[in-house]
């Protein structure tokens, strides 16, 4: 019954969050959706231009894909649509095959969108989404902070009233252009932007229940009108977003031919992986902020379906949007209905309010995005990680810098690879602890206390970590150092309670250790080994090399049997008497 329910909710995931929908959450989600729809207007046009698509296609991409991704994804706050990075990747990939803006170019973009969606859906169905577990919290924090800086940097020219053109996403190019044009800063635009920010901050402090973004938009727009009226429209020269196309997304048909498939597969694969990485990272970041359970596989499915369906409604590749998702979170969204509302409300907004939205000052929009970006930065966790872990701090710093100076997908992959490298380094160096019986306890439990004496004939070691190919060298060298330090201890007892996994290389190591101990006149013993760990022994006959009689399930059984195999002459001369069985040797003396 549970499996059937899980399979059912996997294909209809909105059934999981629908019970938490209440009139109160619907109201909050509707307000967040209104803000998202308004912000999507100028952003959609800008992103489509970057992608080499006609402006209206950016708006289409913010409609249908946003609804599908919200209904079939896992994140409650992620909003899908056109993004700067995805638009840049699309332009750089398709511009060599067709003229940007042409019908042929649009056809290729829609076709590659379908291919991207099919790849993403396939990855989700085979549960490839477990890769999200390798995106550590430090990677998310560093990536989010870097993306926030990118948002601020990309909006600086609008905030300062500059009108030069530059590609977004490359922080170096954006700063170079900014410094070149600093002499052209428009103080009136800066004033409008500052008023917008001040209004947003005031609302958040004094009326936190109010939708500060809408208040900021209204206040900023009114401030622009007042400044223009006071000094003259031409003197103020405050740039506005401009006229918006008022049309619904027409049906489209991807061109799936062998020629197009062969030509577009590399592009589609690169974009599928990139879009998933971007969406998963944003969704994971938002999930961490809200303590929401997150399913990477389901998000893969949702993103795939959004692009598949979107390709038939004149959309190009959509993925998680940092700007819109950040605004959605800040606007108080409670459930995925906020993203659904944003996509649906965008339809009448485009039809009826697009001309009015065209008068929105760019400086006002930049000021709002500044507030959103600042909220994306998590200084509390950054400071905490910096104080507690050098390696995690390196991951945050590297991911942050890579986000600024590399393409976003490479920045995330760099953080993931660094996290994996650190994880592998840790697992390849399991702890090896010398154990001795504690005479102060009734059962003389094993403990790690260098002040207590060891048996002169038996070395007892506990291995905490997996015995796999990456850890074999460390374990071998450490054990040899321990044995060399007390060469008289010819026998070795390994406590296996801390060993959770062993591969063939680990089994071979133990087999060699057994032979080495026998050559030295002792033997190798095991105690408290997990049943599953012995599978390699049984399958590869290593158990016979070590000896069935040398593996024990209880400490009492192990020590009683091992004691009978020790040299009785050494036992009689021993003064440590650390085992209960040593009394026998003492009485015999």
Image (cartoon, rainbow, N blue to C red):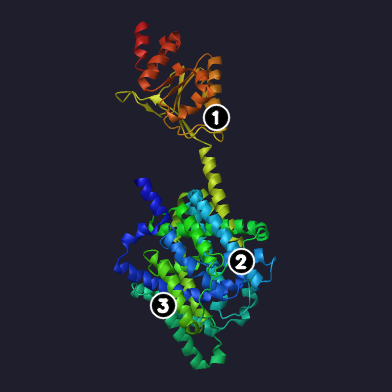
573 is higher (above) or lower (below) than 408: above
User: Viewer-proximal residue, 172 or 537?
Assistant: 537
Q: Position of residue 96 (x, y in %)?
A: 70, 65
User: Viewer-proximal residue, 66 or 241?
Assistant: 66
Q: CA distance from mark 3 to mark 2?
A: 33 Å
Identify the element where label 2 is drawn: helix
According to the picture, the residue beneath numbered tag 1 turns out to be 504
Q: Of the residues under marks 3 and 2, which one precedes in the sequence? A: 2
Foreground tag (2 vs 1):
2
The quadrant in which residue 13 appears is bottom left
93 is higher (above) or lower (below) than 366: above
Residue 294 located left or right of residue 51? left
Instruction: Count residues near mark 2 (Cα–Cα under 10 Å), then give few for <14, some for 14-19, many for 20+.
Output: many
262 is higher (above) or lower (below) than 149: above
Q: Position of residue 333 (x, y in %)?
A: 38, 67
User: Viewer-proximal residue, 374 or 214?
Assistant: 214
Q: How many marks?
A: 3
Is the C terminus in the top left, top right, bottom left or bottom right quadrant?
Answer: top left
According to the picture, the residue beneath numbered tag 2 turns out to be 109
Instruction: Count residues near mark 1 (Cα–Cα under 10 Å), then give few for <14, some for 14-19, many for 20+.
Output: some
Q: Position of residue 418 (x, y in %)?
A: 56, 49
Task: Determine contact: label 3, label 1, CB under 8 Å.
Answer: no
The answer to whether residue 46 is visible is yes
According to the picture, the residue beneath numbered tag 3 turns out to be 214
């Amino acid at each position: 019954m549970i499996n059937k329910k899980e399979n059912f909710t996997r294909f209809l995931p909105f059934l999981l969050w629908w019970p938490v929908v209440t009139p109160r959450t619907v109201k909050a989600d509707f307000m967040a959706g209104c803000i998202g729809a308004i912000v999507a207007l100028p952003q959609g046009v800008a992103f489509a231009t970057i992608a080499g698509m006609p402006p209206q296609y950016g708006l289409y991409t913010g409609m249908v894909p946003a609804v599908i991704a919200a209904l079939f994804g896992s994140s409650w706050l992620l909003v899908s649509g056109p993004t700067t990075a995805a638009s840049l990747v699309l332009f750089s990939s398709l511009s060599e095959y067709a003229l940007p803006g042409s019908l042929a170019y649009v056809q290729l973009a829609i076709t590659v969108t379908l291919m991207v969606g099919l790849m993403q859906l396939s990855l989700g169905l085979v549960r490839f989404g477990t890769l999200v577990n390798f995106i550590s919290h430090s990677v998310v924090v560093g990536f989010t902070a870097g993306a926030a800086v990118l948002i601020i940097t990309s909006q600086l020219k609008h905030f300062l009233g500059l009108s030069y053109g530059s590609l977004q996403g490359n922080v170096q190019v954006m700063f170079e252009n900014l410094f070149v044009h600093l002499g052209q800063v428009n103080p009136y635009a800066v004033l409008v932007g500052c008023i917008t920010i001040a209004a947003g901050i005031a609302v958040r402090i004094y009326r936190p229940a109010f939708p500060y973004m809408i208040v900021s938009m209204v206040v900023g727009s009114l401030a622009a009108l007042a400044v223009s009226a006071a000094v003259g429209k031409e003197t103020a020269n405050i740039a506005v977003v401009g006229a918006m196309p008022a049309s619904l997304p027409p049906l489209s048909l991807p061109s799936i031919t062998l020629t197009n498939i062969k030509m577009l597969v590399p592009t589609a694969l690169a974009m599928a992986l990139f879009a998933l990485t971007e969406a998963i990272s944003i969704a994971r970041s938002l999930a961490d902020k809200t303590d929401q359970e997150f399913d990477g596989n389901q998000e893969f499915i949702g993103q795939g379906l959004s692009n598949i369906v979107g390709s038939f409604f004149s959309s190009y590749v959509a993925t998680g949007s940092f700007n819109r998702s950040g605004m959605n979170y800040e606007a108080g969204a409670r459930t995925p209905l906020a993203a659904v509302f944003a996509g649906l409300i965008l339809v009448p907004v485009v039809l009826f309010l697009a001309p009015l939205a065209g008068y929105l000052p760019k400086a006002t929009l930049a000021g709002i995005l500044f507030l959103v970006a600042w909220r994306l930065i998590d200084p509390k966790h950054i400071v905490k990680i910096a104080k507690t872990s050098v390696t995690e701090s390196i991951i945050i710093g590297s991911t942050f810098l890579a986000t600024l100076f590399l393409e976003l997908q490479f920045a995330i992959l760099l953080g993931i690879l660094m996290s994996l490298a650190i994880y592998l380094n840790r697992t390849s160096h399991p702890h090896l602890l010398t154990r001795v019986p504690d005479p102060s306890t009734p059962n003389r439990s094993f403990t790690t206390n260098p002040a207590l004496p060891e048996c002169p004939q038996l070395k007892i070691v506990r291995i905490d970590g997996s015995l796999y190919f990456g850890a074999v060298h460390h374990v071998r060298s450490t054990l040899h150092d321990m044995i060399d330090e007390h060469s008289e201890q010819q026998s070795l007892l390994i406590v296996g309670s801390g060993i959770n996994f062993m591969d063939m290389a680990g089994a071979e190591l133990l087999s060699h250790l057994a032979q080495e101990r026998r050559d030295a006149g002792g033997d190798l013993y095991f105690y408290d080994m997990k049943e599953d760990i012995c599978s390699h022994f049984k399958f590869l006959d290593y158990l016979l090399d070590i000896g069935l009689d040398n593996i024990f399930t209880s400490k009492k059984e192990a020590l009683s049997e091992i004691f009978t195999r020790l040299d009785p002459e050494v036992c009689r001369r021993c003064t440590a008497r650390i085992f209960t069985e040593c009394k026998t040797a003492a009485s015999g003396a």
